[in-house]
Amino acid sequence: MERGNSQFSNLKFEVQTPLGFWVRTSEEYWQILLTKHPDLEFHLEFVLEALQNPVEVRLSQRDPSIFLFYTLIRERRWVVAVTRRLNGDGFLITSYQTNAIKRGEKV
């Protein structure tokens, strides 16, 4: 489920996680993320899938406001969407492909 928000004019996406909070990012921030992780350029759908229908969610070992949402894209290969939740809403910190799920409390 997606919702629009006129407060953010260059919104790339805003989706609800199964944990009950919304995660958003702007088009500008998405482009910055792609400079660090260009392999995600054509994989926005995996990032959205990780956020909306994750295979697994982990809580950061260092910061209880950071959640890592994983979706499997092929055997032993995940896309992880890293979010921060503040004041009930969330935003995307980063996203990348990985071959391992990080340690941390399973949510």
Image (spheres, grey):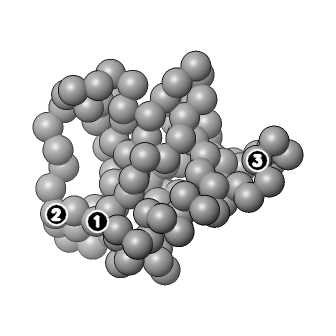
State yes or no: discs 2 and 1 in contact (Cβ < 8 Å).
Answer: yes
Q: Residues within 10 Å of mark 2 (few under 14, many from 20)?
A: few
Q: Residues within 10 Å of mark 1 (few under 14, many from 20)?
A: some
Q: Amino acid at mark 2?
A: Asn
Would residue 13 be found to the left or right of residue 6 on screen?
A: left
The residue pinned by badge 3 equals: 8
Q: Please give the count of numbered marks on the rendered protein.
A: 3
Residue 5: x, y in percent? 80, 44
Q: Earlier in the sequence, mark 2 or mark 3?
A: 3
Residue 68: x, y in percent? 34, 42
- Against 19, residue 30 (above or below) is below
Residue in the image at 59% along x and 51% along y: 25
The residue pinned by badge 1 equals: 97
How far is mark 2 from mark 3, CA to CA?
Answer: 34 Å
Q: Amino acid at mark 1?
A: Gln
Residue in the image at 28% along x and 65% along y: 97
The residue pinned by badge 2 equals: 99
- Does residue 33 show up? yes
